[in-house]
Amino acid sequence: MSFSVSGKTAIVTGSASGIGLAIARHLVDKGANVMFADVDEDRLENEVGEEARAEGPIRMFAGDLTEKLTIANLLSATVDAFDRVDILVNANRRTFVSEILNPEADGVEELWRHNVLSALRMSQMTAKRMIQHAQRAEVEAGTMLGSIINLSSIAAQATRPELLAYSMAAAAMDQMTRSLAVALAPKGIRVNAVAFGSVMSASLQATLKDNPGFRDAITGGTPLGRIAAAAELVEAVQFLASDAAGFVTGQVLTVDGGRGLLDVVSAPAH
């Protein structure tokens, strides 16, 4: 089986910065057509605006992906540009430090809407487009139509009060991944997740800037002894998007340098 994603079309949400941007750039470098999608139009413009207007393998779409109409417009723009969608990477995510006994500041509703529901609606509506395309193209039954990849976190398995909202959202993403995998397998769509911890995301960079001591706590609690670069996560995403993972669905692949095995780090999991 091939690890190639060349010629495939991907949508990567949350791709104006950080891990989402690294994933989207990597897929382009490997020959895929990629729609960069994010709510931050200015960052998208700075990162890929000129390339998107060149009408090559890159396009960009700015909008609030918690809104179903925005998702519908994103999918239409992608199909108009590239004719189809083969890969969806749900990298649109936020972190939140919860005030555990304050219902107004625990962040549960915010992260449920932004991290979980946006990914669910994107997955549902993208799967429908994949199925519709296959019907129009009269694709042979049993053919793999596409791959959906969710970004999760080892926080789904950790119990830390300050991560209440983030942990709940990550756990929900894992279960959503498994449920969609079973539901969409007969349609030829695979659904998996990548759970990460000690990866240098934009949110972790901000945390380390405000709390320099967290770096030693993270590296000391990671068997591999370091924080991974965002680029190290993208290979796992490529694998799940490629035909090499053709018999892999409903799985949550952990990429954290072994950190989740020890669970001794007091810093937030990102």
Image (spheres, grey):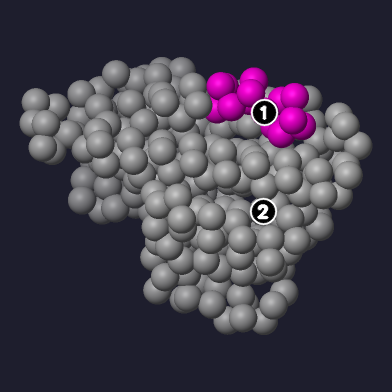
Instruction: Name the side, left or right, on which 186 lies relative to 96.
Output: right
The magenta segment: 177-190
Instruction: Name the side, left or right, on which 68 lies relative to 179.
Output: left
Figure check: 50 above or below 8: below
Q: Which residue is mark 2?
A: 10
Which of pointers 1 and 2 indicates the residue nearer the eye? 1
Q: Which amino acid is tagged 1?
A: Leu
Q: Could one spot residue 89 in this view of the protein?
A: yes
| Residue located farthest toward the right when viewing the structure as drawn | 140
Q: Nearer the viewer, residue 243 or 86?
A: 86
Callouts 1 and 2 close, C-beta under 8 Å: no
Residue 185 lies in the magenta stretch:
yes
Residue at image position (34%, 49%) is 203
What secondary structure prevails in the magenta region?
Answer: helix
Percent of width and height locating residue 66: 39, 49
Q: Which amino acid is tagged 2?
A: Ala
Figure check: 181 above or below 54: above
Residue at image position (64%, 20%) is 182
Percent of width and height locating residue 249: 68, 25
Cα separation between marks 1 and 2: 18 Å
Q: Image quadrant for the N terminus? A: top right
Residue 184 is labelled as 1
Label whose residue precedes the other's in the sequence (1 or 2): 2
Under circle 2, the secondary element is strand
> Quadrant location of residue 237?
top right
Q: Nearer the viewer, residue 79 or 148?
A: 79
